[in-house]
C-alpha cells in the first residue's frame, strides 16, 4: 500500500512538471524538420500548409532569391544565365498599372532636307544684284549677289491653287509680326484665331517682308519641317534663322520676282 502511495505521488509530480515541457517539445516538433530513418515506417505528422506568394508576402529583394521563392513572379530568366527584372507585385488596393502605349496620333515629322540649307550657289540669271528671285517649282529663294553668285534659301510655297507669279517690291518689314488672318482664310478655316500677337508660336515666325499691297509675305515659320513643300496660302515661308538672315540683307523697295 505504501509502495502504491509513493508511485502515485511520483506520477503526480511528473505530470505537474512535465506538461509545460511536453507542450514546448510539441511546439518545437511541429516547426522542426522531420527526419525519417530507413527503418522507420511511421508517416510524418501533418504540418501546416506552406504559404504561397501573395500580395502580402515580404519583399525578398528581387534577383535570384526572389526567383526561387517568389514562384517566378518577381523575376524571370532570359537565357545565358541572366534574368530580366519585372514589375513588382501590386499591394492590396493598388490600382493596376499598364504599360504606356506609344502615341501614334501624330505622324512623324520628316527631317529637314539638307539641300534646303542656306548656301552660296552659282547664278546665271538676268536679274541684277540685290534682287530676290523666288523659284516656286523648285522651292528655292535666291538673293542675287553679283559676280555670278547668289545666296540660296529653301522655302515653302503655296498649295495647289494658291501659287502665283509676278513682280513685287518689299513694301514693309516687321520683326515678330502680329497675324490677322484675312476674311477669305477665316471662311476656309473658321477655327483660326481672329488675331494673334507676334511671338514664337505665331505662324509668321520671326520676321516678315510684305510684298506690295497684297496679302502675301516672305515670312518665317514655327514649322521648319514644312520647308520644301507646297503648304501655304500663297505666302513664301522660310525657317526662322533663314528669314532673319535675309531680313538683314534687304531693304524696303527691294525687287522680288516670283516665277
Image: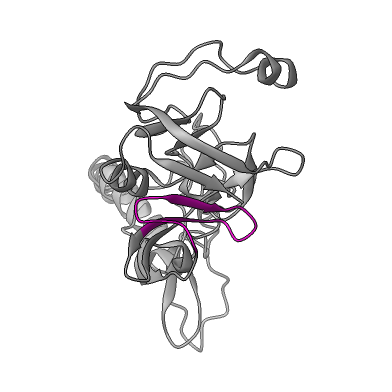
Q: Position of residue 96 (x, y in %)?
A: 56, 37
Left or right relative to 114: residue 241: left
For the record, the magenta segment spans 126-144
Check residue 168 for magenta coloring. no
Q: Position of residue 91 (x, y in %)?
A: 46, 37
In the displayed structure, 219 sits above or below 138; it is: above
In the displayed structure, 162 sits above or below 214; it is: below
Q: Position of residue 217 (x, y in %)?
A: 49, 33
In the displayed structure, 78 sits above or below 216; it is: below
Q: Position of residue 109 (x, y in %)?
A: 55, 52
Question: Residue at point 51% right, 29% down?
Answer: 93
Judge by depth and name the residue closer to the eye, 146 or 161: 146
Check residue 130 for magenta coloring. yes
The quarter in which the N terminus is drawn is top left
Question: Residue at point 71% right, 37% down?
Answer: 162
Left or right relative to 6: residue 216: right
Amino acid at each position: 500500500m505504501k509502495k502504491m502511495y509513493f508511485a502515485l505521488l511520483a506520477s503526480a509530480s511528473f505530470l505537474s512538471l512535465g506538461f509545460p515541457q511536453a507542450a514546448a517539445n510539441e511546439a518545437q516538433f511541429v516547426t522542426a524538420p522531420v527526419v525519417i530513418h530507413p527503418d522507420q515506417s511511421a508517416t510524418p505528422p501533418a504540418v501546416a500548409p506552406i504559404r504561397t506568394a501573395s500580395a502580402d508576402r515580404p519583399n525578398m529583394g528581387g534577383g535570384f532569391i526572389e526567383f526561387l521563392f517568389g514562384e517566378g513572379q518577381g523575376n524571370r530568366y532570359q537565357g545565358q544565365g541572366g534574368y530580366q527584372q519585372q514589375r513588382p507585385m501590386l499591394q492590396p488596393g493598388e490600382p493596376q498599372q499598364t504599360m504606356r502605349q506609344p502615341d501614334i496620333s501624330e505622324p512623324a515629322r520628316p527631317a529637314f532636307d539638307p539641300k534646303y540649307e542656306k548656301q552660296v550657289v552659282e547664278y546665271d540669271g538676268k536679274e541684277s544684284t540685290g534682287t530676290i528671285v523666288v523659284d516656286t517649282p523648285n522651292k528655292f529663294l535666291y538673293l542675287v549677289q553679283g559676280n555670278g553668285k547668289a545666296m540660296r534659301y529653301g522655302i515653302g510655297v503655296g498649295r495647289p491653287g494658291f501659287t502665283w507669279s509676278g513682280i513685287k517690291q518689299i513694301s514693309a518689314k516687321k520683326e515678330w509680326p502680329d497675324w490677322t488672318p484675312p476674311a477669305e482664310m477665316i471662311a476656309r478655316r473658321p477655327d483660326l484665331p481672329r488675331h494673334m500677337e507676334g511671338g514664337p508660336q505665331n505662324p509668321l515666325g520671326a520676321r516678315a517682308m510684305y510684298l506690295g499691297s497684297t496679302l502675301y509675305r516672305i515670312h518665317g515659320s514655327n514649322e521648319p519641317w514644312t520647308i520644301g513643300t507646297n503648304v501655304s496660302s500663297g505666302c513664301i515661308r522660310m525657317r526662322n534663322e533663314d528669314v532673319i538672315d535675309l531680313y538683314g540683307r534687304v531693304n524696303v523697295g527691294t525687287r522680288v520676282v516670283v516665277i
